[in-house]
Amino acid sequence: MIDTDAKLSLPSVVTHDGFPDGDVVLKPDGKIVLLNFFTTWCRPCQEEMPAFRKLRSEYDAETLHMVSITPEVDESLIKQFWSEYEGTWPVVNDPGLVATDQWNANSYPTNLVFDTDGTPATGEQPEVRARTFEEFNSIIEPLVET
């Protein structure tokens, strides 16, 4: 299987305290990937931040590659959101809607999970309906164990 979106990358918004500087590859080879499409004004997006923080503490970045993606262009607003909700994984912006269109992430939040070979973790579509740590973990944990 050829994964045409494996090298798609977007610019990092938060670049201090160990966050990446420059572009972040959204789906690196050989990693379980969680892509979170969000906006700063979205209440469900705000409510799922603790679940993502717990996932990041449960799985290291070599095991689970997590990236949050927003179409918003106001970087100060994104940085403020990331600080307020204590984001501990890379956040990138997608003002040109490249990734948003690629994965049809036209509602917020949209969460996608891919296995280490780049295929959707839950069947033909990568979108997952998970919102809590337990729901996300029930999808990710079996992928780690294989």
Image (cartoon, rainbow, N blue to C red):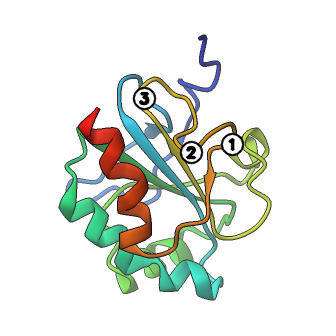
**Residue 20 visible in the displayed image:** no
Q: Name the amino acid type tagged 1.
A: Gln
Question: Relative to 73, does residue 125 appear above or below in the rendering?
Answer: above
Q: CB of mark 2 within 8 Å of CB of mark 1?
A: yes
Observer-nearest of 144 and 78: 144
Image coords of residue 129 (percent x, y): 61, 65
Image coords of residue 124 (percent x, y): 68, 36
Observer-nearest of 123 and 99: 123
**Residue 40 visible in the displayed image:** yes
Q: Name the amino acid type tagged 2.
A: Thr
**SS for dot 2:** loop
x 60%, y 83%: residue: 44
Give left or right: position of 88 versus 52. Answer: left
Identify the image quadrant of the N terminus: top right
Q: CB of mark 2 within 8 Å of CB of mark 3?
A: no
**SS for dot 3:** loop
Image coords of residue 7 (percent x, y): 54, 24
